[in-house]
Amino acid sequence: MSKERTVWVWPTGQGAPIECGHFQWKPGAGRFMYSPAYQSSEDAVALDPVKLGFNRRAHPHKEDMWNGMFGVFRDASPEGFGLDLLRWKHNRDDLDEIDRLGLSSGDAVGALEVCTAEELERKLAYEPPPLQVLCDLMQTDDLEMTSSKLIQNISKTNDVTSLGGEKPKLTVLVQSPKNAPQWWIAKLQERTGPPLMTEREYLAMTLAHRCGLDVAPVRFERVGRHRLLLIQRFDRELVSEVNEPFQPTSRRYAVQRKMFASAETVLRPRGLDPLGDPERSYVGFAHDMQRWGGSRTSGFEQQQQELWRRMSFNALVGNHDDHVRNHGLLYRDGQWTLSPAYDIVAMPSFNRVLAMSVTPDGSRRVSAENLVRYAEHFSLTPEDAWEALQYMARLIVESWQELLVTECQVKAEALELVRPSFNFAQCIVDHTEVPQFDTRKGSNRKK
């Protein structure tokens, strides 16, 4: 049976959404039309400039992939841990795509909601629990309760999250004595999960920042016997509605949202297998970013170079979970650009194969050779790429142990559990792996 819902969007710099169109869905087929009022307004931005571009036709945009869900709507839909939590809370395993969008919390990624007016009111009233509520529960918990159960406990009285990913998490409100409070994502170490997950994500994200990448701010804390990783939301900003200090408990602030699209939405891979699919490609993403983000005059080359650095950094810290849902574009400053990097984790099990392919022929295996040789697809010369690869590798090798010990209080004997994550970086530093390319000045530059 067909279902129809209103699509709402937050205009840039605004704290309230406006109606932008209607989505009609049945399994396997989706249809969307912008409202004439939205399309003609000065605040109008295409939700997807490629798949959902503006036009004067009276015909709807159609989507037959992904069970009829447009990519930007899928990005706003709960998945992974957030979907499991939603099913648990409503005691339903039969939630279809429209149910998930409507029942989800008001913390969905990006600036879109697909729901009824009544459901929107509930989402607008959404208020994440203060970080202190989580910390108080963690302080009193003796680890008999799993992290998942701990979050379920909070969700009995709060809509805590609809975010994806497999790790236990929730959105929390973090206060600041001087600045506006902000929304952060809190990730907890699962008792039965891989060791040092929160520490390894904090480590990789911090090293990425030190290497000059644009990354979401992170914090690591020990609370009681729990370990907690905090990541600032880059798609939300809280702005005071009155000329006085922030008072979150009175909700005298507006929540501004930024539009987001995952790399999966940008690439539109047709294959179902997330691994080994040549359409899930860094080279392809570098190309398609131009279709979303505009011409080279608007910083496109710098965006491609940033993507190459992220791809190479993932290899240097062993992050083989760099799939297409862990990259994305954010609409900011009037254009689509790479979002701050997120979900980067140092992984000791890395075997030199990334989740996304790194070469034009679809290979996912990384080496100094293929990262440097194909750098021109990312607006980098091989010479500049090799210099950047060596710089990042040296910084990582020189910093990772000190970071874990001083900032995460990891014991020295536990460092050996993490060390294999950086084998590739160590090879670069030791020059046991060196790319073969012509080093004559300008010989590899684009003609």
Image (cartoon, rainbow, N blue to C red):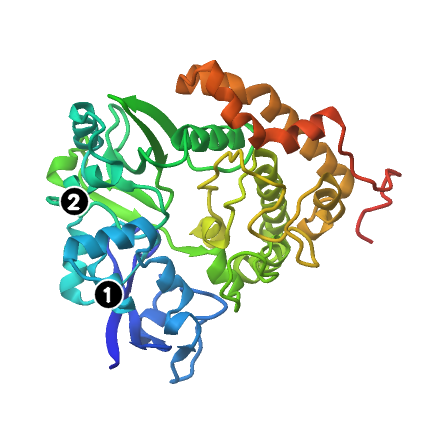
Residue 257 at x, y percent in the picture: 32, 50
Residue at figure coordinates x 47%, y 70% from the top left? 51
Q: For residue 116, what is the image quadrant?
A: bottom left
What's the residue at 38%, 42% (across, down)? 234
Q: What's under tag 1, amino acid-wise?
A: Leu
Residue 229 picture location, percent across and down? 35, 31
Give percent across and percent down for residue 377. Answer: 70, 52
Q: Nearer the viewer, residue 18 or 137?
A: 137
Number of numbered discs overlaid on the protein picture: 2
Quarter placement of the N terminus: bottom left
Helix, strand or loop status at disc 1: loop
Residue at disc 2, secondary structure? helix
Q: Residues within 10 Å of mark 1 (few under 14, many from 20)?
A: some
In the picture as drawn, the residue positioned furthest to the bottom comes out as 58
Residue hosting label 2: 155
Q: Amino acid at mark 2?
A: Ser
